[in-house]
Amino acid sequence: QKEVEQNSGPLSVPEGAIASLNCTYSDRGSQSFFWYRQYSGKSPELIMFIYSNGDKEDGRFTAQLNKASQYVSLLIRDSQPSDSATYLCAVKSGTASKLTFGTGTRLQVTL
Amino acid sequence: DVKVTQSSRYLVKRTGEKVFLECVQDMDHENMFWYRQDPGLGLRLIYFSYDVKMKEKGDIPEGYSVSREKKERFSLILESASTNQTSMYLCASSSIIGTGATYEQYFGPGTRLTVT
């Protein structure tokens, strides 16, 4: 069983729409949750992190965490073609500093 | 801004060669990581280090070793390169200082290694 699961996509949304990216995790004791964006051929870059239940907003991005359901999501409002990328969910569990990454969801924003 | 650099963007090596991949970070981070990324498999942790001369195996350490002699530098070594080690290799670093709830990792640009 994968520890962090994401739908690989592609998720296709029209420009201006809301993109919703989802991630589930298996370790109920997980503490911190991260969303990374990775453009093709580039390295991942951090978009947001969240560690408390509820919503966290940063510009067009909102991260949502539901620890009871072991579910974290990323909403992208007013999607732009430049948002087209693979989005990686990462989870920190335990005392070590390492993160466990999902395999990513590819997002395509169409004109 | 955190800066993580890797010694090469592209590298081509022959089977059996010893390969060194270097990573340097300039933010005095305690933790450093080596991943490989393959299509459909995502990011897989090879080794990580939480202090100078300290290292821990990740999920796929076989065929690799690491060295951390200085805090800012973390090296990945392929003792005898094989074709199944052809991959994108990503280095990352993170700090343990902060709220304790954040351990965000900052990535280098990656090294695309081809073993022929």
Image (cartoon, coloured by chain):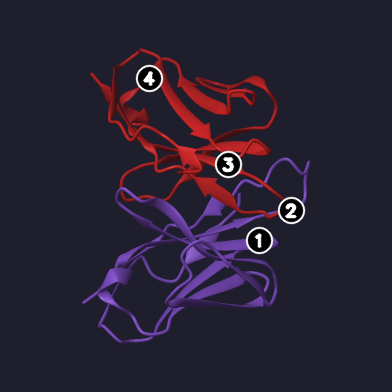
Chain colours: A red, B purple
Q: SS class of the residue under badge 3?
A: strand
* Residue B105 image point, x, y percent: 58, 50
Residue visible at 36% across and 85% down in the picture: B80
Q: Which mark is residue B99?
A: none
Q: Which residue is mark 4?
A: A79
Mark 3, Cα crowd under 10 Å, few <14 / some 14-19 / many 20+, is many
Are circles 3 and 1 on residues that touch, CB within 8 Å?
no
Residue highlighted by disc 1: B31
Q: Secondary structure at mark 2?
A: loop
* Amino acid at circle 2: Ile
| Rendered residue at 35%/22% (across/down) | A80
Letter of the chain that mark 1 sits on in the rendering: B
Looking at the rendered structure, the number of numbered marks drawn on it comes to 4
Q: Which residue is mark 2?
A: B96
Q: Closer to the camera, A80 or A18?
A: A18
- Which kind of residue does numbered mark 3 sit on? Val
- Nearer mark to the viewer, of 4 and 2: 2
Chain under disc 4: A
Q: In front of the other: label 3 or label 1? A: 3
Question: Most extreme residue toward the top, as rendered?
Answer: A17
Q: CA distance from mark 1 to mark 2?
A: 7 Å
Q: Which numbered disc flags the more N-terminal residue, 4 or 3? A: 4
- Above or below: residue A30 compared with residue B48: above
Q: Are marks 1 and 2 in contact (CB under 8 Å)?
A: yes
* Residue B74 at x, y percent in the picture: 57, 72
Q: For the residue marked with disc 1, what is the amino acid?
A: Asn
Q: Secondary structure at mark 4?
A: loop
Instruction: Tell me, yes or no, whether the two marked residues, 4 and 2, touch with CB atoms within 8 Å.
Output: no
- The residue under the point 37% across, 50% down is A42
Q: Nearer the viewer, mark 4 or mark 3?
A: 3
Quadrant hosting residue B100: top right
